[in-house]
Image (cartoon, rainbow, N blue to C red):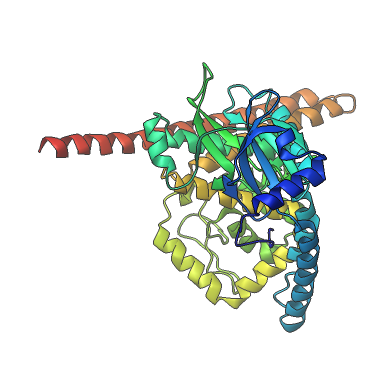
Amino acid sequence: MRPCLDACRPSSFEEVQQVFFDDNGMDIEDVFSHFDSQPLAVASIAQVHQAFLLATGQKVAVKIQHPGLQEFAAIDLKSTETTLRIVKWLFPEFEFSWLGREMAENLPKEMNFVHEASNAARVAHNFESVPNTVLYIPKVLSATKRTMVMEFVEGSKCDQSVHEYLAAHGIDRNEVSRELSRIFSEQVYIHGFFHADPHPGNLLIRPTSRSSGPNFDIVLLDHGLYFDIPDELRINYARFWLSLLSPPTEKNRQNRRKYAELVGNIGPERYHVFEAALTGRPTGTWVGGKNHREKKGRLAALQQAASMLEMSDIEDAEMDKLRAMVVANGDIMVAMFDILRHLDSKILMLFKLNELTRSLDKSLKTTHPPFRIFVIVAQYCNRAVWEDDKIRIALEQSKDRSWKGSYLRRWLIYQFRRFGFGFAASWMDLQGRWVILKAWFSGVLHFRT
């Protein structure tokens, strides 16, 4: 999504000064008592400098867009469009025009810092009512199209150095992973407004000053790329996940295909590829118990567990073998490109978000089972569906005298799922703690011998 300045070359201080003056009508010296000429971080669109406000002395982070980026972006978008047309002409089955559409729609938004400030304010407002949330959004003090002044927040990025930082501050990495999953699940399934680029560089972990809840904050940065999800799509997406996370009864198998079609316009012949892309897990078709698998079509090499919960112990070597098989099988690749061509952009970004949250869980080197974050997804999906059910029942009251029975039935389903997913979550957390305890006990014994 960011083809410009991939090398991340920093703009000179003279260029930074000129951009700031052009957008604000003031020199840097008129606003800041000190402005560090060396950037703290450089990305493809902008770079960030540390500074102190002249009026208050407050330490701030100043985000400055690279000069000329607006013009270069227009050229790059046109070049990309032309290249994709050539690819389509040469290889009709590998059609990438959807990528060009996404770039043309979203890159201008990312390059408008007023839009970014609005996104930051909106997500902060959304989480004001979330009890004991660990999410923290730095306050934006001012913004123009190419400059933004915001509160300076210190912490550790979720990179290779985060493990030492967490250990030094007594922060549980398993809990960090769980809270990350809760934050993005709240955004997707409850608010319908989500950050679509939560890579490690856009996340900081710091000790908290709160008196309750976890002992850390998760600071979310770079709010240029957000997506709204229409309520109907949000609920259907939640129902699709619930069907994936439920036992493979005939009804659930039907629901998986039903909601795949509603969410992504995915027909039966592409369903198993769509599910594998969404979950990052092998998929296929079941016709009965674990010893009765039906293989259909040329994509039958992808196999599905009875529910996704049964795939939590899949080995990395097996996944590497699966990836190699997918690359080698032209039919599967063609099916993937066909799916991408027809998917709504919001679903594509949800794909990306799923992969990023899985990657963050792995990079944190958590000790709980790898499927733990999906249990959190299930809990939020269950909540979203129940809230939608209540609204639907309220609308039905005047038309259907049996609404009380419908309410009771759906409430029982909600409670059954809530208990089941809650039990699974507690069991996985216990497993994670047991791994840590075994490692500690083994270390003690090794030290004594």
Q: Hey, which residue is sitting farthest right in the picture? A: 399
Q: Is residue 143 above or below residue 131?
A: below
- Picture residue at 59% right of the left edge, 26% below the top: 133
Instruction: Decide if residue 249 is in sight here.
Output: no
- Picture residue at 73% right of the left edge, 70% below the top: 96
Q: Quadrant of the N terminus?
A: bottom right
Q: Nearer the viewer, residue 17 or 59?
A: 17
Query: Relative to residue 135, is residue 55 drawn left or right?
Result: right
Q: Quadrant of the C terminus?
A: top left
- Picture residue at 73% right of the left edge, 73% below the top: 95
Q: Nearer the viewer, residue 103 or 97?
A: 103
Q: Is residue 198 above or below residue 130?
A: below
Where is residue 116? Give x, y as percent. Answer: 74, 41
- Picture residue at 72% right of the left edge, 60% below the top: 266
Q: Nearer the viewer, residue 408 or 278?
A: 278
Report the number of numbered marks. 0
Instruction: Decide if residue 448 is in sight here.
Output: yes
Where is residue 358? Give x, y as percent. Answer: 53, 48
Q: Is residue 197 above or below residue 318?
A: above
Residue 343, located in which quarter of the rendered image?
A: bottom right
Where is residue 275? Give x, y as percent. Answer: 62, 57
Residue 99, located in which quarter of the rendered image?
A: bottom right
Q: Hey, which residue is sitting farthest bottom in the picture? A: 90
Q: Hey, which residue is sitting farthest top in the picture? A: 211
Where is residue 215? Give x, y as percent. Answer: 47, 25
Q: Is residue 219 above or below residue 268?
A: above
